[in-house]
Image: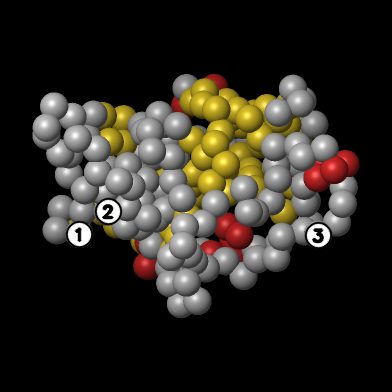
């Protein structure tokens, strides 16, 4: 499952989870037939040096938000739920492995800057929504459907894997002059003692059509 992205002053924001989830804190344990699955690990994510745009654009005026993400290359089709921060400063995460989320306190897709989408890589039941992100190649297309029915198309520029201790916070959350998106999930070896993955996959993509 996804685990939390800590936004503390000196915390790290990285994806790691017992089930290989994204930024966020440990999700509540779920009981099925009185059997409790393994607890979700806590990924690390360094607090982004980020300021949300304050301009009143058409997008903000009409409260435009991303509704779905579609990636043909890796068979991803998911609605997007807005994710905020928990009281401890960590990023909320989807509670369902097949569900992707959008960091709603960050950039809206289509606005200048990096909009951040996160999703689990797997769960105790198997592969999750972002299980195949590492298969993406440059120029692969990512479609984001907005809540007004409009569609944004992004082209992948690169896919990188990082140890969670070296997560590139500035590259993922830092300001950019053009609309971009980042997709993040867990990767690497699974540390059973820590109940988390050691690495993160980050997909970088630029807007090519709106």
Determine which of the numbered discs, if any, sits on residue 8 in the image: none
Q: Nearer the viewer, residue 167 or 3?
A: 3
Crowdedness of circle 2 by 10 Å Cα count: few (<14), some, many (20+)?
many
Disc number placed over residue 41 in the picture, else none = 2
* Residue at mark 1: 194
Name the residue at 14% across, 58% down. 193
Residue hosting label 3: 54
Mark nearest the camera among 3 and 1 is 3
Q: Judge the density around disc 1: few (<14), some (14-19), many (≥20) Cα neighbours within 10 Å.
A: some
Q: CA distance from mark 3 to mark 1?
A: 39 Å
Secondary structure under tag 3 reads loop
Of marks 3 and 2, which one's residue comes earlier in the chain? 2
85 or 100, which is in the foreground?
85
Q: Label 3 neighbourhood size at 10 Å, few (<14), some (14-19), many (20+)?
A: few
In this orientation, does residue 162 appear?
no
| Residue 5 x, y percent position in the rendering | 44, 58
């Amino acid at each position: 499952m996804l685990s939390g992205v800590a936004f503390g002053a000196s915390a790290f924001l990285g994806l790691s989870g017992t089930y290989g989830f994204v930024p966020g804190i440990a999700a509540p344990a779920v009981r099925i037939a009185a059997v409790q699955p393994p607890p979700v690990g806590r990924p690390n994510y360094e607090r982004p040096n980020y300021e949300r745009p304050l301009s009143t654009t058409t997008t903000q005026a009409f409260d435009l938000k991303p509704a779905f993400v579609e990636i043909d290359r890796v068979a991803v089709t998911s609605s997007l739920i807005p994710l905020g921060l928990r009281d401890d400063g960590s990023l909320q995460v989807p509670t369902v492995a097949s569900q992707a989320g959008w960091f709603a306190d960050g950039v809206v897709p289509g606005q200048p800057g990096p909009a951040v989408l996160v999703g689990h890589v797997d769960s105790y039941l198997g592969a999750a929504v972002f299980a195949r992100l590492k298969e993406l190649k440059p120029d692969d297309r990512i479609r984001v459907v907005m809540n007004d029915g409009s569609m944004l198309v992004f082209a992948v520029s690169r896919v990188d894997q990082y140890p969670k201790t070296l997560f590139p916070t500035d590259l993922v959350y830092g300001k950019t002059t053009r609309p971009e998106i980042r997709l993040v999930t867990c990767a690497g070896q699974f540390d059973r003692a820590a109940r988390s993955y050691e690495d993160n996959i980050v997909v970088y993509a630029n807007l090519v059509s709106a």
